[in-house]
Amino acid sequence: METNKKKIFYTKDIEMRFGGLYALSEINIDIFEDELLGMIGPNGSGKTTFFNVITGFYKPTSGSFYLMGEKLTGKEPFEIAKKGISRTYQISRLCLDLTVLDNILIGTHLKQSTGYFTTLFNKKKLMKEVDEYKEKAIHLLKIFNPAIIERLYEPVGGLPQIDRRRVEVSRAMIAAPKIILLDEPSAGMSPDETEVFMDDIRKIRAEMTNVTIMIIEHDMSVISSVSERVVALNFGKKIAEGTYKEVFNNKEVRKAYLGEEYNHE
Amino acid sequence: MKKKNKFLDILKIASIETLIFFLIMVFFRIESTWILLATLALIGGTLLYTRIYKKQTESIKALFASNRSTVLIVLVLLLLLYPIVSPIIIPQSTYWTLILIQTGIYIMVALGLNIQLGSTGMMNLASAAFYGVGAYTAGMLALKLNWPALITIPVAGIAAALVSLVLFLPVYKTKGHYLALVTLAFGYMLALAADNIEFIGGPQGLKNIPSINLFGYDFLSKVGNFHFYTNYYYFVLALVILTIIISHRFFNSWIGLTLSYIRDDEPAAKGCGVNSNRWKLLSLTTGCFFMGVAGAIYALMIGFISPPNFQFAQSLLIVSIVIIGGMDNILGVIVGAIILVIIPEKFRVITQYRVMLYGILIVVVLLSRPRGLIPFGARKYEASVLGARNGKEGPDGNK
Amino acid sequence: MTSTSVVFQILFNGLMLGIQYSLIAVGFTLFFGVLDVIHFAHGDVFMIGAFSSMVLITLFRLQTASGVSYIILLILIFILSMVLVGGFGVLFERIAVKPVSKGSPVMSLLATLGLGIAIREAVRIFFPRGSESKRFPEILSKLFSGKEAIKLGGTIFRFENLLILIIGVIAIFLLGLYVNKTKMGLAIRATAQNGEVAEMMGVNKNRIIDITFFIGSALAALAGIMNGIYYNSIIFDMGAIAGVIGFSAAVVGGLGNIYGAIAGGFLFAFVESFSAAFIPRGSEFMDVIAFAVVILFLIFKPSGILGEKVYERV
């Protein structure tokens, strides 16, 4: 598929082996600037493993990956975050006892300039920075659901599931990364909530220009409505790549999801 | 009209606090066990009252919450007046002043542990050992080298921080329960070392450590009619306030946020770019610095330290203060110290049961309120302990 | 004493100590495996084992019995102590361990630390003259009236010590059989690997937890009895250091791994035995040396000798 977008990320023959199980093998995926790339595949096909590898939580047993030409393989998660990749998790990882604001502000960690000694001796500088990032957080929440703002200082555990997702996404967004990885963001949502969430994704796209989004999804309606490009995995291997339509009609993909008997046009 | 209401509020707060202040002094004074039990019954009754008459309790709570600066200023004033007023009311005021000073010192140690355990979730069962490192450092520097207190105290803190760095560097990446075991070992080894190294006194410890002497003024000298620990009382009060302010600043900053996130979900923190290993070390060394400083003050004040002061029992006390009082909550730690240090002093009759009661209390608190009696509240990024910013309440002046 | 006899003596000491530490360590590792908890009061359960057996010995007037009734009483006391303490173990688990198990292991560590202290102090306060060490009666020597020991290469091996060693080894062997060959054992292993899935497969998790704590505590009680017989003296805080060493042994062997716990127990015992013999004042520093070993392990091989079975999920 031809595109005049810049390639900012690619993997080279990534292999992730757990004992005898090949969770990923021969993975070669390119990611382009300012695109929305969808990743689909049946359960256990290696999608989340892929995210875990490219964010440094798992070190691949072989292969490598590059962001803006720089090799990131073997780096720790916090180093990769520093290079510009943010993510959300399949099961939301928020600190439920901490406030909504705290959970978003942690996303600004790499941009915080007030350090140890400044905190002790230069209160004003810290407060200025806090206010600045708080404004950003509020701005992001306004996009999704202004009602959350009233609960800014409440524990995030008290929010409904969909708002918690939004907080998690805001945390990833506020870091102003080059790539945002969303791992099954609509998991656990009802069809209505999913509709609303697809709107959320469009709003993210509008808000964050020049940022690439990669989204793992099971819900095909989400993928079909928001992705520009789709890549499909099965048993740890990439089996198809292209537009949603191309991938959806791919024989291998149909076989993976629907089984042999349904493999007809 | 508004000014008059504000003045009335201040008056209300001041009178409530002064009343409690006097009741506490009466509490210190009472000797008879029966009256003590009656006092406890009274406290229990008051607590019951607050449960039943919720509305009045809520309004008082709200009053205190919205006038935090007044509450704190009155509190500090009362504490400043204490050494002057107490001899009038309490015959054994010397003893209680010393107890209060000791509590203050323990609060400093506990606030140090609070950074490690409460904020970052790292278990340190050797706080008494680091307290001891500070005490011995200050003791040795004062005794053998005659260094002035203004230097030995911060140096003692740094010594404790350095020792902690050396000890923790190989092991801080280990998981929580392993860290507990390792710190248990450290505490044990350091205590054993103190007992066996003749150079620092061995089992006899250090004697005749010179007290703090500021420009010729010996801190142990009597001030008028007040007893000789009075100077130390004010010194420790000032340092405790300083420690509280520092802890407050840590909590309401990126530091507090990052440490809490490491505590509650380290992988997620890493995903946001947090170099959790470095922050953990920072937390450990900072906490140990506080502990070292507290130890130094103790050594200089009492003039005599020995290995039995720095055993696991004391570490356990500090851990209990943080767990029972409230993890990651400055007020909780203070309350914990009051409950675990002052109250047992009064109930001498239960001394033999004291350790057993600690054990039971830890279990009960962990079962019913795992985050302590006063768990941490929302981080509001307050600029000041006094709670107000730019003359208004809260960070943006609205909430 | 020739040097070989010294070595034999040290080795034998190591074995005797090792069997006790292993029995305790196995409990720690099982509890962690099944419930993800650190049971810091387990050492004090060991102490209760020693004390309750001593009480039973006095109660049943074992020392005035003889012949067949003596043997029956002896066996009865062993079994009764183990069952009793096993029951205590379950009680403690229900009160103070399971409720805090949902949190991090640090919480359970703290709660059981408190529990252990309470138990220890309760014995010190409420047992008559509890703070003094008590003489544990010689109960096995009657079995060997006449020949008390054999001499091998200059070293004396007392029969009663050999007997306890054999009992201990049998206990561990039976445990291994139970865990690996029985249905209940399978249930325990399943729960240790993945409690949720085990439950979905029909395992009654709560019952398994109770059973695990019963077995672990009973084994600790056996160790307590052995300790009493071997050293002839027990004291209220004997569980404190035994608990720490037992935990260390389990950690070094890899938490959750029974064979590792056994290996760890013997490792610590031999380190202790050798250092007590060769390092001046070694027996005082034994605990410190044990700690140093643990720390070294944690630095260089954090998952233990045989590996801890934990996978961090993201």
Image (spheres, coloured by chain):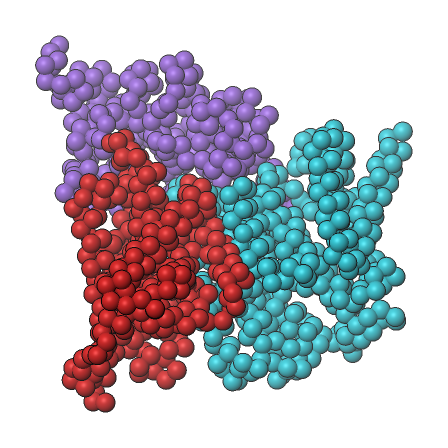
Chain colours: A purple, B cyan, C red
| Left or right, A219 with reference to C8 | right
Q: Tell me what residue is drawn at x 69 percent, y 30 percent.
A: B398
Using the image as rendered, state which of residue C253 and residue A7 is in the foreground. Answer: C253
Please count the marks in the image: 0
Q: Position of residue B34 (x, y in %)?
A: 75, 54
Locate the C terminus of chain B by quadrant: top right
Q: Is residue C245 above or below residue B262?
A: below
Q: Is residue A99 above or below residue B15?
A: above
Q: Tell me what residue is drawn at x 83 percent, y 74 percent.
A: B222
Using the image as rendered, state which of residue B232 and residue C220 is in the foreground. Answer: C220
Using the image as rendered, state which of residue B138 and residue C108 is in the foreground. Answer: C108
Residue C90 visible in the snapshot: yes
Locate the N terminus of chain B by quadrant: top right
Q: Tell me what residue is drawn at x 34 percent, y 65 percent.
A: C62
| Left or right, C238 with reference to B228 | left
Q: Is residue A198 above or below residue C63?
A: above
Q: Is residue A8 above or below residue B37?
A: above
Using the image as rendered, state which of residue B256 and residue A158 is in the foreground. Answer: A158
Residue at the far top: name it.
A265
